[in-house]
Amino acid sequence: MREKKQIFLNIRRDDVRVAVRENGELVEFYIERGDTSFSPGTIIKGKLIAIRKELNAVFVDIGAQSAGFLPLNDFYLSLPHRKSDEEGLEFLVQVKKEPYGTKGARLTTFIAIPGRYLVLMPYKEAFGVSRKIRKEKDRQKLKKIAKELYTDGMGIIVRTASSGEDIRVMRADLLEIKKTWERIENKSKIVEAPYVLWTDEDLPIRITRDLLDDSVHEFIVDSEEAFKKIKEYLSRKKSSLIKKVKLYKNHTPMFNHYWIEQELRSIFRRKIYLKSGGHIVIDETEALTVFDVNTGSYKGKETTEEMIFKTNCESAVEIARQLNLRDIGGIIIIDFIDMRKKENQEELLRLFKKQLKRGKARYKIVPRLSPNGLLEMTRERARKNIAKRFVESCPYCRGKGYALSAPYLLSRFTTWLEKKGRSLLNSKVRIIANPRVAIYFETEGKNTLEYSCVKNKMHIEIIHKESNPIELVEVITYNNDEVIKEEI
């Protein structure tokens, strides 16, 4: 059965959202809001800050808060005529991965400018065909066309959308991209670094250019303005897919009408439930992401081995979907349930690899499961993890996932009192804490605090502060004219 693929484009005042469904299931989600100056694809005239050979890195000023990171090999291969110590050197770079947290943007000097049917590589003489075109016959045919379009020592990649298109349409697309490159080059000669020379199209056009192909059943847009822009773009590109673009006219918000809003909530869940009754727990750290597969309340008549195999297979499909949906990158560890049969392990691995190929991100995966059922892989990520765009560190636990208990904090305060000893004599101590901790101090810690007050002839005042993290207990000591502020 052929998959039914749908694209939904939702335009709002503060953001633009795109959802992609396959057979009624959400598989991709994109959102864009605010400034996109350093989003992937942006071409910048940068300035060399430093070359760090021990880190295999070149740091480039691109006008962002953090310096951009360029691999050393990339720098030397693309600019062989430059000296390695030319600090202040100005040259063109393209954002490969957007800035993430405190990390600067990852850059490349191998610039690529995408069109509807082709990608132009001004600094790299090579011919390629999209990985999504798998039939060797089609690949050879398109590679031949790419060579016919050969231009001025530049490289060309033939995109999936070009399959079946006339060479004249592709040539017109190439001409448009070349004009873009000429404008970029001309501008680069008159501006000082750092300077943003070119940013990619707005999200509605990018989605049309990159995702709309023969596999799409319908492309539904809820903005008349965006609808007209997309129609104009496809008309200019002489695309037959223009008939697949439809305007949503219902009064109910589109994402609500198609139940996409409800599906999006799964992006933020730590636990994903499977239809069989099993579940997957997702834990993300700074260094890696772990998927833990559990049978949970599995319901079925199979033997234990069959039940485990079925749960693992269902999990493999869902994990591949979540990787794509959340755009999780870096090191990934999957803890499948242990299986005894080697053929089941091999079949599970084949299934998982097949599901991963449906996504666009590059990945590397170990050839077999570990004896404990662990699977290790790495996955490229161009953008910030979708879920992390909408969450922030918990103000209570400071992002750890747990917080020190009120009894332990009282114990630490008691230790502080013992350490200070007679220096607190005739002083006033003010404790500022989260209400949950403050209430515990006032109730369970009442006897301890009263004893200290009597012993040291001191006064203790407890202040409730809602904005304080659970673990933060501030102590201000007033002793004669001296004021001491501490955290315990």
Image: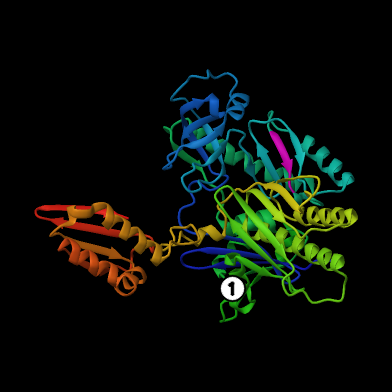
Q: What element does badge 1 sit on?
A: helix
Q: Residue at x 68, y 51 (%)?
A: 333
**Residue 444: image location, x then y, percent:** 34, 73
Picture quarter with the C terminus:
bottom left
Q: Is residue 262 left or right of residue 377?
A: left
| Residue 462 visible, this angle | no
Q: Residue at x 68, y 60 (%)?
A: 292
Between residues 465 and 163, which one lies in front from this camera angle? Answer: 465
Q: The residue under label 1 is which amino acid type?
A: Glu
The furthest residue to the bottom: 251
**Residue 37: image location, x then y, percent:** 48, 47
**Residue 302: image location, x then y, percent:** 87, 72
The furthest residue to the left: 481
Q: Residue at x 90, y 55 (%)?
A: 343
Q: Residue at x 73, y 61 (%)?
A: 241
Q: Is residue 446 above or below residue 189?
A: below
Image quarter of residue 439: bottom left
Q: How many marks?
A: 1
How is the structure coloured here? rainbow
Image quarter of residue 473: bottom left
Between residues 154 and 367, which one lies in front from this camera angle? Answer: 367
Q: Is residue 133 above or below residue 194?
A: below
**Residue 205: image location, x then y, percent:** 60, 57
Question: Which residue has dot 1 on it?
Answer: 261
Between residues 130 and 60, which one lies in front from this camera angle? Answer: 60
Please say whether residue 87 is one of the residues in the magenta stretch: no
Q: State which region is magenta.
A: 155-159
Q: Is residue 29 above or below residue 50?
A: below
Picture quarter with the N terminus:
bottom right
Q: Is residue 110 left or right of residue 402?
A: right
